[in-house]
Image (cartoon, rainbow, N blue to C red):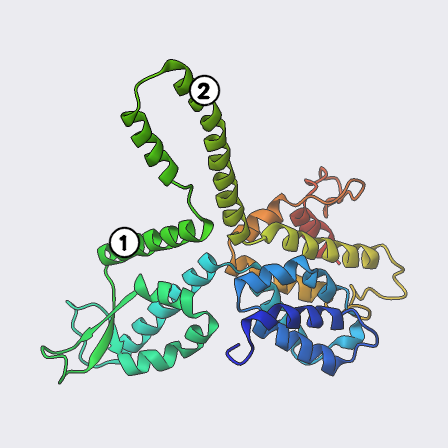
Amino acid sequence: FPLLPRAQMHTCADFCTQILEKEPKSPGVIHATLLLLLRLLRSPELSRHCLKAGLAEKILSLPKECRFTGHSGMATLIYRRLLEDEQTLQSAMETEIRGTVLKAHGKTRNQDSGKAPSMSKKIFVQSMTPLLCRNPVVFLKAIAVTVSVGSEGGAESTSEHIVSLLSASERARNLKIVSAFASKKSKISLGKAPTVRRSSLGKSKRGTPRSKTPTRSHKRSTTPKKAKKERQFEIRDGAAEDENKAPQSPVIGLLISNTLKLSRSSISGDHDKGRDFGYKTSFLWTAEILGILSELVLAFPGCATTIHRYRPHKGNRTQHALSGCPTPPKTFVSFLLHSLLTQ
């Protein structure tokens, strides 16, 4: 969002989440609100803020009257960006960059088998503009470990600049440089334990005569403080790492529980009234939620593990689709196979 100051993004996101709670909810207002949220969620930091504010729950609680053309596709993109962290975004950008270069290289007539796939720098910049606007910092990290810029001929002034894919060894070397730079930057942002006192203490020990009592008392008084500071910095590092992880389990669990709620009410309902699976009442009905789950599994492979490990609450026993067979495991996958697909 180039025209929106960074300090006002959180305020704007809070206003959008409040609009989703107010009544009445017209399709046009909900469409504009979700579209604005989709633009704001480009930042992983803002995605974590909206996730803590309950954006995932508020979208699922919207009624049917809020639907508009393409509402399920927009909801899928919003849930995807809620789970997207910098590492996942960088991996997706690297895949897109390599695919673009390979596709452009395949269209050229004069291909040299000994050279790496390449394309014109001008065409590359035009193709990568959406990724650059998505997140410039992550885009630079993805470019650093994917491609290199050079000249096609000998003299750079007369030859055209091209973008070439890096080899495996070059990618490994650049990846180490980027990782070292990122870790150094994180340490600077978190802060370091002061080292001046340690050097000054060493100098004072050398200058003064040895004495057992002061030295022992000094060690006893400083060692716990030093250990306490080290533990504080370790906790800060761990908290920073936890904040950067994508919160897949809560969102996947929320989508699965909503699917079970809509499906079980329709399966156990009256056959004469019909089984709509939330189609007549909810903003996202069962089929659309399952579509969102499938998109999230393709984008984040870890979501598949979360789905397989999810177990419904006690009392919700799934019967086997075939009569006479033993009861299947009490999992969400068993519910899909034996209860939902048989309807």
Q: Is residue 207 left or right of residue 295?
A: left
Query: N-terminal of the two: label 1 or label 2?
Result: 1
Separation of marks 1 and 2 at Cα, in angstroms: 50 Å
Q: Residue at x 68, y 40 (%)?
A: 329
Q: Residue at x 53, y 66 (%)?
A: 43
Q: Which mark is residue 7?
A: none
Q: Quadrant of the C terminus?
A: bottom right
- In the image, residue 175 lies at what x, y percent? 31, 55
The residue type indicated by label 2 comes to: Ser
- Examine the image and state in which quarter residue 205 appears: top left
Q: Residue furthest front?
A: 208
Foreground: 196 or 185? 196
Residue 294 appears anywhere in the view: no
Q: Residue at x 59, y 63 (%)?
A: 47
* Mark 1 residue element: helix
Give the residue pinned by disc 1.
172
Give the residue pinned by disc 2.
217
- Examine the image and state in which quarter residue 23 appears: bottom right
Q: Residue at x 63, y 64 (%)?
A: 291
The residue type indicated by label 1 comes to: Ala
